[in-house]
Image (cartoon, grey):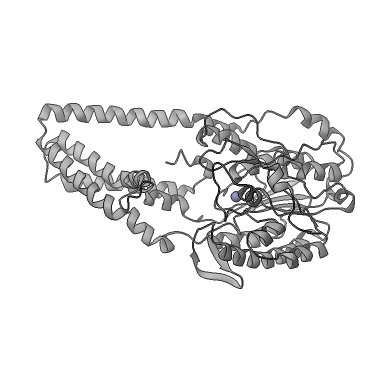
Amino acid sequence: MWLRNWTEEPAATDIALTFAGSLGWGALASVMLRPVIRDASRHALLVALAVLVALGYGHCYNVVNSLGVWHRHLLPAWLATFGLLTAGIACLPALVAVRLTAWLRNAAVTVIAWQLVAALPVLWADVTHAVAPHPAAASAATAGSSGSAASRPDVYYLIVDGYARGDVLRAVHQFDNGEFLDALRQRGFFVASQARANYAQTRLSLPASLNMDYLPPLPTTNEYEPHHAELRVLRKYGRVLRRFRQQGYRYRHVGSAHFRRAADADEELYLGNGDGSYRNAFLQTTLLGPLVGKLAGLSRGNPADVHEFQFKAIAQQKTVDGPLFTFAHICCPHPPYVYGRHGRLPQPVGDDDANSSLYVEQLQYLNGRVLELIDAIDRTSGPGAVIVLQADHGSASLGMDQTPSAEQLFERMSIFSAYRVPEATRQELYPTITPVNSFRVLFNGLFGDNWPLLPDESHYSTYQRPFEFTDARAEAGRERGAEE
Ligand SMILES: [Zn+2]
């Protein structure tokens, strides 16, 4: 499980806890079963069964739950099967028990070895983070060596996850966000009123925007895992970051629950104990799953803690003079809903994209915090600081079908996107800009680079089939009603 979640960077303490928990349960089962069964092979089989029963329950539940089976059906059946298997093992002839134990041991070793081999590319990419330089990168960047680093403005790239475009808020969520967008304009922002996402989900969208390019052709399989290494390297060690470093910038990474760490950052800021989602995901797959589900509010860390930490950390005082590039992925207004329009809720309520009214309340509160954040950034970096506020994709109250409706494409692929840049750079921005072009325009303006603009494409896909794309340009491209 740790290897599978490697790219999401679970906290070391969570990994240790889940690992210790599994081992502890195995040891406890072993001690408890010893007086009952003295024969070593049968004892070993029973311990293995106990571990399987406790740790495999949630995986089985996840499979059958999609068929309409609930805990109240599965749990008794699961325990009855355990009882039958226990009786079966107790009756096994000694020789069969010995052979079965040996076979299970070999199978376990094989599975672990196979997982390690499968994970090697991910681990290797993480260690070396070698990204082939883009052929155009060198030539585009050569022009931009004028001016000293000290004169360059600080740059903040702040992702507000799932933040919908103004016309989507009006047409789909029945909310007029004009007051906030005007407040941004008064603070010197250019609001790209027809901005679209390049991809429909965070894990595809951020690697693209942080590389100023569409994703390279990926192998045909439709699962994330084979592509994790590549996507992660693109996100963490992308071209945007390298260009800033070449220009003498320091890198401040403000961690989120999803992308907690960036060990190579000059200022790596993250909430020490994380949000416990890895630990929780692990518990959900065990026999304790039904209980954990009930206690979720207690056992899961509150995402609002992470947001609050980020609001403080993004604009905290610089430790060293010189230009700073800050990246933060704020998982808000994306559910779970932790804010009402007037402030933090006592407990997160719901995790449902379809709940428009909770989504809008959370967004309204976020708006106020964003304006405060801009003031805080100005105190830290001065009013000349460059700020890009951008959603990675839109909201999803209408759902995300494999064959999406025009309305679903409009909602998911239309994004909030706002830039505060020097006036000359602002002239190069345009209403339909997509994130692959954000830093192309920015670098051309700030550093005198020559990045050609790419066609603004929008590739929709679902979480089930992330690499099966639908072109969403037409649906998300047209703005509903006048924005400007
Ligand atoms: Zn997202």
Image quadrant holding the C terminus, namely bottom right
Q: Total number of numbered labels?
A: 0
Front residue (pair 272, 415): 415
Q: Is residue 19 above or below residue 302?
A: above
Q: Position of residue 246 (x, y in %)?
A: 77, 38
Q: Quadrant of residue 248?
A: top right
Q: Position of residue 158 (x, y in %)?
A: 69, 53
Q: Is residue 263 above or below residue 111?
A: below
Image quadrant holding the N terminus, namely top left
Residue, far bottom: 342
* Left or right for 43, reference 25: left
Front residue (pair 327, 420): 420
- Please report the residue visible at 70 percent of the width from the left and 66 percent of the height from the top: 176
Q: Is residue 171 above or below residue 59?
A: below
Q: Position of residue 379 (x, y in %)?
A: 77, 64
- Please report the residue visible at 65 percent of the width from the left and 34 percent of the height from the top: 215
- Please report the residue visible at 71 percent of the width from the left and 67 percent of the height from the top: 372
* Left or right for 337, reference 14: right
Q: Position of residue 457 (x, y in %)?
A: 71, 39
Q: Is residue 171 above or below residue 264?
A: below
Front residue (pair 180, 171): 171
* Left or right for 344, reference 252: left
Front residue (pair 387, 393): 393
Q: Quadrant of residue 135?
A: top right
- Please report the residue visible at 54 percent of the width from the left and 65 percent of the height from the top: 338
* Left or right for 241, reference 44: right
